[in-house]
Amino acid sequence: IGKKVQAIYLWWHKPVINKELLQSLPNLKVIANSGVGMDHLDLKLVASFGVKMANAPRAVSSTTADTGMALLLASARRLVEVHNISISPSMEYCEADILGVKVAGATLGIIGMGSIGYKIALRAKAFEMNILYHNRTRREVQEEQAVGATYCKKIDNLLQQADFVMLTVNLTPQTHKLIGKRELELMKPTATLINISRGAVVDQEALAAALQAGVIRAAALDVTSPEPLPRDHPLLKLKNVIITPHLGIKTDKATYMITEEAVENILAALSGLPLPSEVLPS
Amino acid sequence: MWYHKPAINEELLQSLPNLKVVASSGVGIDHLDLKLLSSYGVKVSNTPFIVSTDTADMGMALLLASSRRLVEGHEMAVSPDTEYFPADWLGVEVSGATLGIVGMGTIGYKVAERAKAFEMKIFYHNRNQRKKEEESAVGAVYCKKIDDLLQQSDFVLLAVNLTPQTHKLIGKRELELMKPTATLINISRGLIVDQDALVEALQNKVIKAAALDVTYPEPLPRDHPLLKMKNVIITPHIGSATKKTRWVMMEEMAESIQAGLAGLPVPREVL
C-alpha cells in the first residue's frame, strides 16, 4: 500500500513524518499541512526525499485572531472563574472575586505582527485599545496608522508598557523561550499574557512561577508544550490561568477552508504545477 | 443603591421622611418605581454612560466564548481525565458571521463597533432607526420587524432595557424563528427572555447555545436546568464589573447624592 501513497494531508501533526515513513512511501509527492505552523516538520528531511510541502496560510488568520481576542476578553473579565461561581452549589463570592480589568483604554502589546497579529490589531482597535507591536521588521506606515499601532524595536519597551501581551510569532530557534523569567519580570504586575502561537515560545516553568508569585496578573494559553500538559502540571491548578485545547482554527468554516487549500496544493503537486502555498526549507 | 438593594417600597419611603435622593448603580432602572419615588419628592439618578463600554465588551466576550466553546475547552484542558485533545472538537466561526443586535442604544451600538472589526454582518432591531451615517459607520442594516433579524442571525444579542414592551420579548415563537445553529446572548435583563421557553429550546436543539450575563432571578435557584447545560455560559451580572468602571460609578453616585442633598440640579437624574 505504501507504493500507492502520493499525498499526505497532515491533520493536527499526524501522522508523524520521519525517515522511516518517508522511506516506506517511495511515490509520495506532497505533504499538505492543516494550518500555517510548520515547526513540527523537518523541512530539510522532507525536501531531501523530493517531496513538496504546503501549508494553509489564507484560511487561518481571522479565526486564530478571533481565538486571541476570545482569550484576551475571557481573561480580562475572569469569564471561566465567574461562570464556575454562577453554577456552583453555594454561589458565595465577594465582589473582589468577580471584578475584572477594563479593556477599553488598556494597552495591548502584540509580539509578532504577521497576518494573525495584524488581524488582532484590527480587532483590538475596535475595543479602543492602545496598540504596541514588536516584529522582526517594521510594517508600512499606512498599515500602522490603519490600526493605530506603535512599533517597539526593543521587546523590553513593549513588555514594560503593555497591560495585555499577545504572542503571535511562529516558532523558530530565535523565538524558542522568547518569554522567560526576564521578560515576565519586565511586564507589569497587573498584566496578562496571552499565547496563541506555540507553547515552546514561553518558558513554562518561569511562567508558572511568575503567576504564583504575582509577578504578572494572569495568563491565557491556547497552546502549551506538550499538548495536553501532564495532569500534574502547576499551570493546571492556578485560578488565574485559562487553558484552551489549541482552539486556534477549530471552527466548522476554517477547517473546511484549510482542507480546500490543502486539496488545491495536493492537486497542483500531482499535476506538476506550482503549488499555491508551497513551503521551502529556509 | 447597589445591585437593586435595598428594595424601595412604600414602607421604606414612609420610614425615611428626610430621604432626598436615591443614587442607583448602573444604567437600568427597571427595579425602581419612579412614580412612587416622585410622589415622595425623592430624586433618582443612575450611571448611564460609564457602563456602556464594559457591558459591550462583556457581550463580545460572551459571544466569542460561546462560539469557540471556551469554557468547555478549558474544562477539558485542565481535567484530570484528559489524555489527548480530540481532532474533531470544533466551534463556530465568528469572523464573517451574522450578528443581530436587539436594542441599538449606546451599548448596542458599541457592540456593533466591535463586531464590525470581526467582519461580521450586522442587523439591528430598535424602536427607531438610527441615522444613515451611524448605520454606515458600523455597516448595520435595520430590521423593522424583529422576525427578519431572528431568521438571519447566527448570533442574537439582546441590549434593550426592560420595559413592559420588552418583557418576555424573546419567547417560544422568537426562539423558533432563530436558526438551529444560532446562539442567544443576553446582557440586558433576565426578564427580556422567557426562561422556561429558553430551557426547552436549548434541550430540543431549537437553538444551539446561550450565554447569559443576566437571569431571573439573580442568582438562579441552584437546581435550575440552565446551570447544568454544557452549551450555556452564565456569568453573575458583571457587565460593568471592572475596577476602573466601578470606581467611576461610585464617584458619579457620590456626586449625584451631594448635589441632591445641597438642593442643586442632580447630575444623571432620571425623570
Image: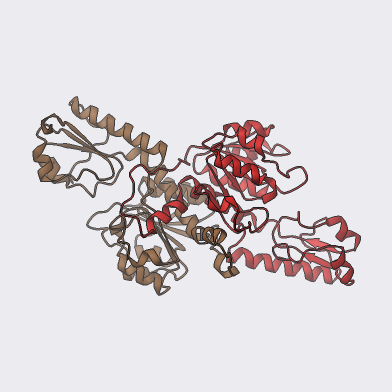
* Residue ID at (23%, 28%): A268
Q: Colour of chain A?
A: brown
Among the 4 quarters of the image, the one containing residue B270:
bottom right
**Chain drawn red, letter?**
B
Query: Tell me, what colour scheme is on the image?
Result: by chain
* Residue ID at (78%, 45%): B164
Q: Position of residue A255 (x, y in %)?
A: 36, 38
Asked if one can make out residue A194 in the rendered structure from this viewpoint, the answer is yes
Above or below residue A127? Residue B20 is below
* In the foreground, B210 or A181: B210
Q: Position of residue B167 (x, y in %)?
A: 73, 45
Above or below residue B265? Residue B114 is above
Q: Position of residue A103 (x, y in %)?
A: 53, 58
* Residue ID at (91%, 60%): B39
Above or below residue B177? Residue B66 is below
* In the foreground, A139 or B113: B113
User: Residue furthest toward the top?
Assistant: A271
